Image (cartoon, rainbow, N blue to C red):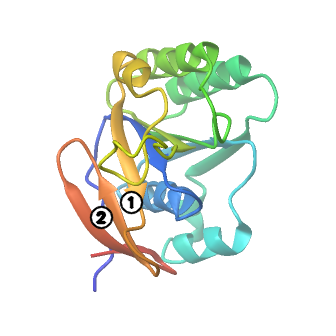
Amino acid sequence: MERYRFEKSSAKIHLAVEGSIGGTSLGLHMATDVIERGGRVLWASPFMPDGVRFGQLFSHLSLANSAKYHAMNIGGDFDQAVEILIQTSNSLPSVELIVMDDWCEHSGRISGEKIKAVEKLATQTTDDICVLLISKGSIDASGNATTAVVARAKDAMKSAGFEIWRLERPKDGPHRTLSTEKDVKNLRLEEEGFVH
């Protein structure tokens, strides 16, 4: 099995994740793909990724390459964090990916203020930067949904210019389904990341 490679993209993506099944790992995997191509990554989250997991996913990169990963904490003022991301992406050379992990509450409605802030992030960064927002999806209690996880604020996020992606676990074990707007990828989550 070979490591999955994410193509270079300038998409604005809202990734809805079912439970704790590898959303952060997917973001880190995309980050290493960008860094291998020579780009930079801005990572923003209330918590830094687990050090062991980070080490596993970044193990194939040189130390010099790892310096193209810039992390910041967004535990405080969210609007200010978004402003810093916009400024940094416009001042640092070759930023290709901005990841905001756990950027909103884990359940319930995503506030209009946060959606407005991430829309600003999407519109005020250059067109060649991919913006990836990772959040917990919700489960449709009505039973009408055809998927295990539903993206919260789907319509508002689409209006803000974001594609809706879903990461789900179809059965116990390492298998994952990544649904993008173009297709569905069946992947396995391994120590080094996602593989075909």
- The type of residue carrying mark 1 is Asp
Q: Label 1, label 2: how many angstroms apart (C-alpha)?
A: 7 Å
Q: Which residue is mark 2?
A: 5
* Residue drawn at 58 percent across, 52 percent down: 69
Q: Is residue 164 left or right of residue 84?
A: left
Q: Which residue is mark 1?
A: 33
State yes or no: discs 1 and 2 in contact (Cβ < 8 Å): yes
Q: Is residue 159 above or below residue 135?
A: above
In terms of depth relative to the viewer, which is nearer, 100 or 34? 100
Which comes sooner in the sequence, label 1 or label 2?
Answer: 2
Q: Is residue 109 above or below residue 140?
A: above
Q: Is residue 39 left or right of residue 43?
A: left
* Residue drawn at 53 percent across, 22 percent down: 118
Quadrant where the image shows the C terminus? bottom left
- Where is residue 12? Give x, y as percent: 37, 32
Q: Residues within 10 Å of mark 1 (few under 14, many from 20)?
A: some
- The type of residue carrying mark 2 is Arg
Q: Quadrant of residue 76?
A: top right
Tag shown at residue 160: none
Q: Is residue 57 left or right of residue 81?
A: left
Determine whether the residue tagged by mark 1 lies in a helix, strand or loop.
helix
Determine whether the residue tagged by mark 2 lies in a helix, strand or loop.
loop
Q: Residues within 10 Å of mark 2 (few under 14, many from 20)?
A: some
In terms of depth relative to the viewer, which is nearer, 180 or 45? 180
* Residue drawn at 75 percent across, 42 percent down: 46
In terms of depth relative to the viewer, which is nearer, 52 or 34? 52
- Where is residue 157? Give x, y as percent: 42, 24
